[in-house]
Image: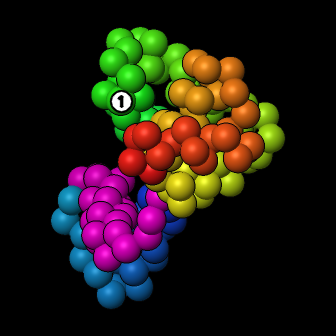
Amino acid sequence: MRNSEIYINRIVSVLNEMENRGDLVITTTSNNNLAEEIYSSIVKSWLEENTDFEEPIEFTLPKFLEKITAVIQNNFGLTEGESKEISEKYHKTWLEQRTPKEVAELYWHQGPQDIALRAYYTVKLGNNDKEMDFLDWRKKYGA
């Protein structure tokens, strides 16, 4: 039984108890429909009131990878497919070393431009983006 069904059954039980005590007169033929309406309105109200939460940062990775792919494509004149392959390979190397949350935090800190340059430098050119040569190379691209 799903949680919603448990809550709906509990609401039906409370409605029946209230009716038996004389606190409420129910004129519907289906207490379940009434309970479902009450439950739905509570859930809807709760969701409307609690929209100030943020999704976990790692949920933003797919959108961020799209940005990285676009930067690679624009900077180096590659096809979308080639650019996507580079960004995904680079991303995979990070996921082998860190959690998705850590990777997302790193990406957002560095920005799509820097991550795209690092991905191209590492994957396409076969260089190490953690060496000093990378810092000189990326200056050509305004970083």
Which residue position holds label 1? 75
Q: Which residues are magenta?
A: 29-58
Residue drawn at point x = 54 percent, y = 27 percent: 120
Q: Amino acid at mark 1?
A: Asn
Residue 53 lies, in percent from the top left, at 43, 70
User: What is the chief secondary structure element of the magenta stretch?
Assistant: helix
Does the stretch in magenta take in 55? Answer: yes
Report the residue at 27% width, 59% height from top: 37
Q: Residue furthest right?
A: 97
Residue 133 at x, y percent in the picture: 67, 40
Q: Is residue 96 left or right of residue 21?
A: right
Residue 82 falls in image quadrant: top left
* Crowd around label 1: few <14 · some 14–19 · many ≥20 (10 Å): few
Q: Is residue 46 left or right of residue 14?
A: left
Q: Is residue 87 above or below residue 100?
A: above
Residue occupying the point 43% across, 40% down: 140
Q: Is residue 142 above or below residue 74?
A: below
Residue lying furthest left: 27
Residue at 37% of width from left, 73% of height from top? 52
Task: Give the x, y percent position of residue 55.
Answer: 47, 58
Judging depth in this view, the residue of 37 and 124 nearest the camera is: 124
Residue 38 visible = no
